[in-house]
Image (spheres, rainbow, N blue to C red):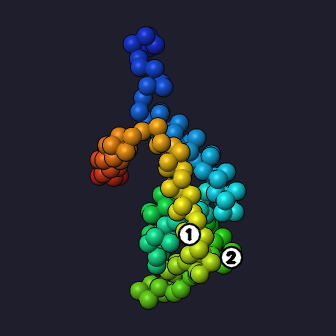
Amino acid sequence: MPTRSSDTLPALERFLTYRMHVVNKVSDRDSNRAYQETCGLPLGEARCLAAIGRYAPLSVNDLARAANLNKGQASRSAQALVDRGLVSKAACENDARGVLLAPTRAGQALYERVVALIARRNDEIFGCLSEQEQAQLGAMLDRVIAHVGREG
């Protein structure tokens, strides 16, 4: 395999995927801290509560897709939320083995705090962009998500 001079290759930090990863890592680190301090939840549980609060009732598979987690992570986070009394599990009428997840009254109240925190974090991360730039970036990200979704 021929070697290439580093002068002919783009710098790692110029790749969009690399920069998206940096934003994701910093955002997750800071968001995890904020969720713990504000809501008493780790990041995965907060994301699951946000998805359950928005889309309930959800199966664990639907939750995994909505929260962008694998099924195991979604299942563990959902169970932790059930154990905390924030989410209820009900039997799924269509699947005897399946369950449907929905927020409890306490879970709904915390969901509202989680969504307010998401909005604040969104402003902190993207506040350096104008509203128009944020809308443009959002539209571009939607296109990229649709594109990579077709490949999977």
* Image mark for residue 72: none
- Closest to the camera, between mark 1 and mark 2, is 1
Q: Is residue 96 left or right of residue 29?
A: left
Q: Position of residue 115 (x, y in %)?
A: 52, 63
Say which residue appears at 62% left-offset and 46% top-offset: 30
Instruction: Kindly report the distance in space between the C-alpha atoms of the residues bearing marks 1 and 2.
Output: 16 Å
> Mark 1 belongs to which amino acid?
Tyr
Q: Looking at the image, is 98 positioned above or below residue 24?
A: below
Q: Secondary structure at mark 2?
A: helix
Task: Give the residue drawn at x 39%, y 40%.
Answer: 130
Image x and y of residue 99, in percent: 51, 81
Residue 116: x and y in percent read 54, 61
Residue placed most toward the observer, 113 or 148? 113
Image mark for residue 111: 1
Residue 8 in the image: above or below residue 80: above
- Amino acid at circle 2: Asp
Residue at label 2? 83
| Residue drawn at 41 percent across, 19 percent down | 10
Residue 26 rendering spot, x and y as whole percentages: 58, 41
